[in-house]
Image: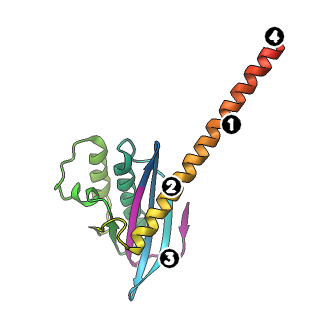
Amino acid sequence: MTKLLRPAEGEQLVAYTDGSFKDGIYVYAFTLNVQEGSSLIPVFISVGECTIFSGHNNVSCELEACYRAVQTAQKLGAKCVSVYTDFHGCFKFLTHEWGVRNKQFLMYVNLMSGLSIPFTIQYVPAHRGFKGNNEVDRLAKREANRLLEESSKNVSSKSARAFAEKIIDALTV
């Protein structure tokens, strides 16, 4: 789900990013906002299943959320973006404070380095009352739960179909 709420061209944006991993489901979420006084005015909201990064549980989700937020700010023509995340790796991989030990982390560094928009990434502690962080945390968890429920319904209907086909086969023999 993506929602463009207002134009962002030439704006200095503030992004909050988060990810959620649950039972094999990888989800990212981010908001892009304009700061007006002490208020954040939403510009863009995005939440969805990860398609770029996977395989490293929540780390994959956090990296994808951060990358997509900066990439989207660039696509919207923003002047710059300040990203707030509750995962240290989003900036520590880029500053080489943490070693890049696998292909996924290297891909993140390369993708982020390839963006032309000026950006900063700052850490905010999770679940400590930061409104923007709490919002994307809720968005990511809600989407992970929705996708998990949808996945289990698909598995249940496939199982039911297979069972029905076996019964029909048995009756027609």
Residue indicated by mark 2: 48
Local secondary structure at mark 4: loop
Is residue 49 shown above or below 44? above
From the top left corner, tell me how far across and down residue 27 is, in percent.
46, 52
Q: Nearer the viewer, residue 43 or 27?
A: 27
Q: Are marks 2 and 1 in contact (CB under 8 Å)?
A: no
Q: Residue furthest right?
A: 172
Q: CA distance from mark 2 to mark 4?
A: 46 Å
Local secondary structure at mark 2: strand
Residue indicated by mark 1: 157
Residue indicated by mark 3: 7
Q: Residues within 10 Å of mark 2 (few under 14, many from 20)?
A: many
- Of badges 2 and 3, the one in the foreground is 2
Type of the residue with mark 2: Gly
- Of badges 4 and 3, the one in the foreground is 4
Is residue 154 shown above or below 9? above
Q: Which residues are magenta?
A: 1-19
Q: Nearer the viewer, residue 45 or 158?
A: 158
